[in-house]
Image (tube, rainbow, N blue to C red):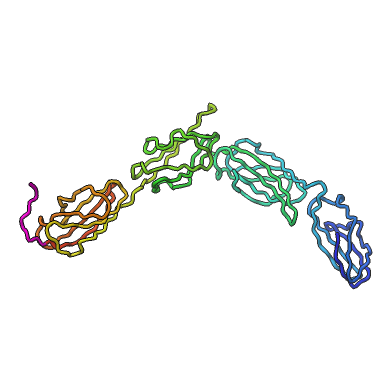
Amino acid sequence: ITLNMTSDFATLNLTLFVEGAIYPAYNDTPIAASTSWIEVISSIDSTTLSEGMLNFTVLFENLAEKETVYLLYYVDNDAFGLGVALYTPANGSEISGLVSIDLNVTADVNILNLTVFVDGVIYSSEFVGTGDISVIVDTSTLIEGYDNFTLFFQYDVLATYFAYIMHLVYLVDNDGVPITIDHQSPANQTEVSGVFDLYLEIGSEYEPLEFTLFIDGAIHQYNKSSLGIKSQIVSINTTEVLEGLRTFTLYFYYNVTGEDASATYILVFSVNNHDAPTIVLLAPTEDSTITGLTDLWLNITNTHPNLFLNVTVDGVNTEEFNGTAISGGAFNYTFNSSKYENGHHHIAIITYTGENVSASTEITLVFLDHVRVWISRL
C-alpha cells in the first residue's frame, strides 16, 4: 500500500488494521517522517486474510496526534467463490400456484443481487444473502406451459464485479389442461376493421400447434396453420367479412406425438370497414324559388359499395328518388316540382348504405310553377 505523506514530525508509529484486527507486521511500528515522503506499507500477505471485500485502516500516531486512512480492498486469492445449488423443485418438474424455489448459495461476500427472468422478461429483483434462500414465484401471473427461469446472481461493488447464472425450466400448469389461451388486444366486444393484429398468450405443453380461425362458423384465412406458443400475433383480414357483430372462434390442436390436445377460444368483434356516408347540399340555397324540373346538386361521400337515395317533399317520397341506387360524388339529382302546389315546401334528402347507415340534410324551397298541367306517367 503506497501513500503520499506529509508531517511536521520526524517519526511516527504506524498500525495497520484489517477488519478491525491489528495486522501483526504493523503494530505501533516506528517509521521515519518528513514534510514530504512516500510511505510503502509492504509485506502484507493477503493469503492469510479472509476472501472478499475487507476494510483496511492505517493509523499514524505521534503522542496524542493521530491520523487515519481508511481503505477498502477486495481480497481474492482463489478467484471469486460463488456457487448455487438447487434443492427444490427439481429442474423440469411441474409447478403451480405460489412456488418456493429453494437454493443454497455460497459466496465470498454476504450480499448478492438476484434478478429472476421468466422467458427473458424480468420477474423480480432483490438482494439475497448466502446460505439457504427461497425465491417465491407466483405462477398465476405466468404463461402456462414450459417456462424458462433464469436466476442471475451478481456482485457489483466499486471496481469488483462477479456474476453467476442458473438456468431452470418448469412446466407451469394452474388449470390442469395442456393448452390455455388468453389474449391481450383488441378487447373483446370492441370494433375492428381492415387488417388487425390479435395479440395472443398461448400456454401449452406442446408446440407448434395447428391453428384454425372460424368467423361465424366458416373457416377464414387460417386452416390448420402452424402457430407457436407464448406471445403470438395473428393478423386477421376483415375486408371480406360481413359488417356488424361477428363471432371469431380460434381453434388450437396438437396431435403429433400421440398426445391429443385442443383448445377453443371465442371472441366477438364488431366489424366496421365502412364509415357512415356524408351529404352536402351545394345548390339550391334555402328559400330559393324553383320551377318545373329542379336539380338538387349534392356531394355525397361514401366507402360502402352500395349507396341509395331518398328525396321527400313534405314527408312524402318523390317518384324519382325512393330507395334509388346512386354513386358517391358531386352530381345533380332532378325531380319535378310541377307535381306540387305553389308555395313553401320542406325537402328532406336521405342517403344510406347497404348497411343501413345513413346521412341526411333538409331545405325549404318555394315552388312556383307557371304551368299547371303535368303528366305523371304515360
| x then y, percent, for residue 20 | 84, 58
Q: Is residue 56 above or below residue 122?
A: below
Majority secondary structure of the magenta segment? loop
Name the residue at 16% across, 62% down: 365
Q: In which quadrant of the rendered image does the N terminus lie?
A: bottom right
- Is 160 placed left or right of 310 in the picture? right
| x 10%, y 57%: residue | 338
Q: Position of residue 92 (x, y in %)?
A: 63, 35
In the image shown, does 303 or 54 lie closer to the viewer? 303
Horizontally, residue 377 falls left or right of residue 241, namely left
In which quadrant of the rendered view does residue 368 lie?
Answer: bottom left
Viewer-side residue, 169 vs 198: 198
**Is residue 375 inside the magenta stretch?**
yes
Residue 97 figure quarter: top right
Q: Position of residue 268 (x, y in %)?
A: 39, 43
**Residue 194 is inside the magenta segment:** no
Look at the image and give the residue range highlighted in magenta: 368-378
Furthest-top residue in view?
A: 258
The answer to whether residue 177 shows anywhere in this view is: no
Judge whether 267 appears above or below 319 on screen.
Answer: above
What is the residue that sits farthest to the left in this orientation?
A: 373
Locate residue 30 relative to residue 94 in the image: left or right: right
